[in-house]
Image (spheres, rainbow, N blue to C red):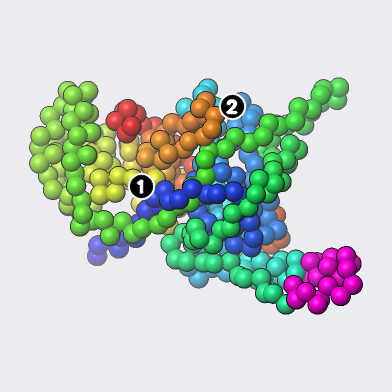
Amino acid sequence: MAAVRKPVLLGLRDTAVRGRPTGSGAWTASKLGGLPDALPSVAAPRPVCERCRQPLALVVQVYCPLEGSPFHRLLYVFACPRPRCSMGGARSWKVFRSQCLQTREKEAQDAQKQENRLAAEDWCEGADDWGSDSEEVPPPQRTLDFGNDPHSAKDTDCTAQLRDLHLQDTVLGAAPPVSPGEEMALPSLAPQFLPYYMCVVDEDDYRDFVSLDHAHCLLRDYQQKEGMDMEQLLSQSLPGDGDEKYEKTTIKSGDKIFYKFMKRIAACQEQILRYSWSGEPLFLTCPTSEITEPPACSYCGVRRIFEFQLMPALVSMLRSTNLGLSVEFGTILIYTCEKSCWPENCQTPMEELCIIQEDPDEPLFK
């Protein structure tokens, strides 16, 4: 019996994030860049680079609750955008998973309402006459796919942004304690890429509108560089995964993988993320043993499974006001705990596994 193909959702860059979104549903937005949003009762991750010990920049934040689960769920991917670390491999990348029970989130909202009510009563007698107590706090908006709804986030002024920039925030994975007699250096402010929302589409919606012209152009460049005959490859149609005719040609394994990657993304070249929980990643280069047998969850011991990957088009979309910030990669593979374990009353995000596949010919994706 043929294996059932897991659905694949594609993340595309959407509108720019204006200001710092706030409110109970701000963290339900999937985005690239900006600052990480915190779930109720769980701190936002603020990791540092293992190479330069400086704060990492948020690359993407993905709201991805699992079907049938009682948890809200966020995944964050960070990278070091400094030139000396941008090609630093796994030591310059981090991924974290954060969760909270939906009932806990409602309790947190009720507690906040009660706190606001008491504060109003303290400040002025007869505050109830204004009617502010009777307004219900709307529940966080949720949708299918990544749960992203860019219209649910509200714009705020710069003061909201400044509140999130703390010089002395606790940093996950920070440098070791300072020895007696040494001065403690305050961590720098976390660098930021310009924030954009992500919208989500189903890959199957693009399969009837495939144009291989761009892929062919890139592969001809690759042919000139490698000195290999691509004519037979370029004459093939776009078959399904189970009917890869080009695999019968006498070409190197790495070139087959590269061609399969380029042919698959040709349907939607602007994709910056591919999401397929417990599905199969789209490899850019030959997979290593770390990919074929990823290490088990370090918290519960259950195996890790593929969840999503970052795509080459994202590299040119990570922009900042500081021209010295950038990251370089081919594709970033994200693996998470199959059970999505979460200890009771956990208040800090859990680190998961990210695997970097370097771009075999980085200029081709520019």
Total marks shown come to 2
Residue 123 highlighted magenta (yes or no)? yes
Q: Which is more toward the observer, 96 or 149? A: 149
Q: In which quarter of the image is the C terminus?
A: top left
Residue 103 picture location, percent across and down:
65, 71
The answer to whether mark 2 and mark 1 are in CB contact below 8 A is: no
Q: Earlier in the sequence, mark 2 or mark 1?
A: 2
Q: Quadrant of the N terminus?
A: bottom left
Badge 2 local density, few (<14 within 10 Å), some, or many (20+)? some
Taking 20 as reference, is 147 left or right?
Answer: left
The image's mark for residue 114 is none
Place residue 292 in its image quadrant.
Answer: top left
Q: Name the residue beneath numbered marker 1.
A: 271
Residue sitting at x 63%, y 52%: 156
Badge 1 local density, few (<14 within 10 Å), some, or many (20+)? many
Q: Which is more toward the observer, 298 or 366? A: 366
Give the residue type at disc 2.
Answer: Arg
Residue situated furthest front in the rendering: 130
* Element assignment for label 1: loop
Q: Name the residue beneath numbered marker 2.
A: 51
Residue 97 picture location, percent across and down:
57, 52
Q: Which is more toward the observer, 24 or 183? A: 24
Span colored in magenta? 114-133
Taking 235 as reference, is 18 left or right?
Answer: right
Give the residue type at disc 1.
Answer: Gln
Residue 23 picture location, percent across and down:
64, 60
Frontmost of labels 2 and 1 is 1
> Image height check: is 267 above or below 86?
below
Residue 42 highlighted magenta (yes or no)? no
Residue 243 picture location, percent across and down:
17, 52
* Element assignment for label 2: loop
